[in-house]
Image: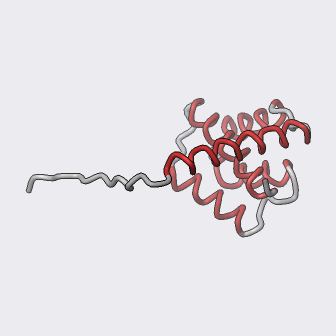
């Protein structure tokens, strides 16, 4: 898994945690942060990612403290754990790819009344 992908998964974790704690974030906020990662912001480690998240999502002192606490409390995964997760994800993706071979794609249709 690339560094950007690892940081993106960490970003998703904090996004979900902040939502669970009542921080008013939306999809646009998350996508803005992902775009910033793709552009190279927050790439120099956890501290840089924390600074990016604070800049984009912290709108009050309470939110600033919550984000800082989250980064302080969530442990940095060991390389062995990251490798195990990568391996498990690769197996899941391979299984899903095998299951979707030969299946027609389903599309949803929304019907409205005018």
* Count of labels in the image: 0
Residue drawn at x 52%, y 56% as measured from the top left: 28
Residue drawn at x 17%, y 52% as measured from the top left: 111
Q: Position of residue 98 (x, y in %)?
A: 56, 48
Q: Would you say 21 lies left or right of 26 here?
A: right
Q: Position of residue 101 (x, y in %)?
A: 50, 53
> Coloured how?
secondary structure
Furthest-front residue in this view = 102
Q: Would you say 5 lies left or right of 27 here?
A: right
- The foreground one among 106 and 37 is 106
Q: Quadrant of residue 78?
A: top right
Furthest-bottom residue in this view = 39
Residue drawn at x 66%, y 38% as measured from the top left: 63
Furthest-left residue in this view = 114
Q: Position of residue 114 (x, y in %)?
A: 8, 56
- The foreground one among 62 and 15 is 15
Q: Quadrant of residue 25?
A: top right
Q: Position of residue 84 (x, y in %)?
A: 82, 38
Q: Would you say 19 lies left or right of 73 here?
A: left
- The foreground one among 91 and 20 is 91
Residue drawn at x 71%, y 50% as measured from the top left: 53
Task: From this view, report whether residue 26 is shown above or below residue 40.
Answer: above
């Amino acid at each position: 898994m690339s560094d950007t992908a690892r940081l993106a998964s960490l970003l998703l974790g904090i996004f979900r945690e902040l939502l669970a704690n009542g921080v008013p974030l939306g999809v646009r906020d998350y996508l803005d942060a992902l775009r910033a990662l793709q552009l190279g912001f927050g790439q120099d480690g956890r501290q840089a990612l924390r600074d990016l998240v604070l800049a984009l999502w912290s709108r009050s002192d309470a939110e600033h403290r919550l984000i800082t606490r989250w980064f302080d409390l969530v442990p940095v995964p060991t390389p062995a754990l990251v490798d195990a997760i990568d391996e498990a994800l690769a197996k899941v993706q391979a299984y899903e790819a095998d299951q979707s071979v030969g299946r027609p794609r389903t599309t949803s249709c929304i019907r409205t009344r005018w």
